[in-house]
Image (cartoon, rainbow, N blue to C red):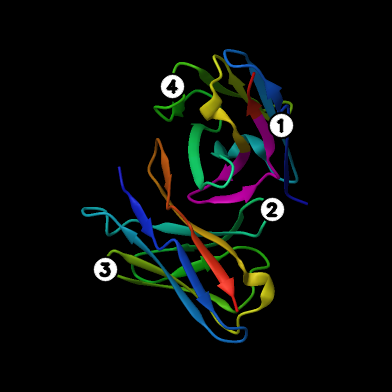
Amino acid sequence: QPVLTQSSSASASLGSSVKLTCTLSSGHSSYIIAWHQQQPGKAPRYLMKLEGSGSYNKGSGVPDRFSGSSSGADRYLTISNLQSEDEADYYCETWDSNTRVFGGGTKLTVL
Amino acid sequence: EVQLVESGGGLVQPGGSLRLSCAASGFTFSSYWMHWVRQAPGKGLVWVSRINSDGSSTSYADSVKGRFTISRDNAKNTLYLQMNSLRAEDTAVYYCARVRGPADIWGQGTMVTVSS
């Protein structure tokens, strides 16, 4: 089954942009992933589904500031015009017919 | 409003049992596969189990296989997780999630604490 690798932490300044990375393991570079946001003390929230082509579909109500892109086995989440409420943990997810796998999560700090 | 609401969590002794419920509303529950995902305190998300739309097929993480049973009642729009032989390492917030490809709707979670 695939393994998803994420950096443990990232930081960026209020109003700037940040690009988070999720890397698929060898042999799984074509997999579709999803990005989820988990604000402190809250449940995860689905942000988007992201294909290997770079095409993405966002969940209901997700601001335009959130976008996705892909390159090879890497899947990216870009957040523009960072707001204080964007400070959260971000998880990537992938799946097959029987299981699903989550990355370890990236803790984003907004400075 | 599309919503998932978990219940049934609590404090249980090692070796004990607990049944979690997840009540769905605002969508056609019987059309969706459903999953349970857990999160130990301060840790990341970990997939636990899944069930297909009519309940005829299930799958489990190795860590819970043989101890946990997922089921659903489409007439009641409710998902269940029966947890037996609970261990300290099962301590976590348990989330139910609606799935069609990605997990696109999450419940608010219910806390399970396994401790003597």
Name the element at disc 2.
loop
Q: Chain of mark 2?
A: A
Residue that extends furthest to the front in the rendered view of this protein: B116
Q: Nearer the viewer, mark 2 or mark 3?
A: 2
Q: Position of residue A3 (x, y in %)?
A: 32, 49
The answer to whether residue A91 is magenta is no
What segment is highlighted magenta in the picture?
B95-112
Among the two numbered marks 1 and 4 on one chain, the one whose residue lies closer to the N terminus: 4
How busy is the neighbourhood of tag 3: few (under 14 within 10 Å), some, or many (20 plus)? few
> Quick check: do tags 2 and 3 share a chain?
yes
Nearer mark to the viewer, of 4 and 3: 4
Label 4 element class:
loop
Q: CA–CA distance between discs 1 and 2?
A: 24 Å
Residue pictured at 50% horizontal, 33% vertical: B50
Tag 1–tag 4 contact (CB < 8 Å): no
Q: Residue A80's image quarter?
A: bottom right
Q: Nearer the viewer, mark 3 or mark 1?
A: 3
Q: Which residue is mark 2?
A: A42
User: Circles 1 and 2: CB distance less than 8 Å?
Assistant: no
Q: Would you say residue B97 sits in the magenta stretch?
A: yes
Q: Disc 2, disc 4: CB below 8 Å? A: no
Mark number, residue B77: 1
Q: Which residue is mark 4?
A: B65
Residue highlighted by disc 3? A72
How far apart marks 1 and 4 lie (CA) works out to 24 Å
**Cβ atoms at labels 2 and 3 below 8 Å apart:** no
- Label whose residue precedes the other's in the sequence (2 or 3): 2
- Is A25 left or right of B103, judged from the image as shown? left
Instruction: Say what amino acid the circle numbered 4 marks.
Output: Lys
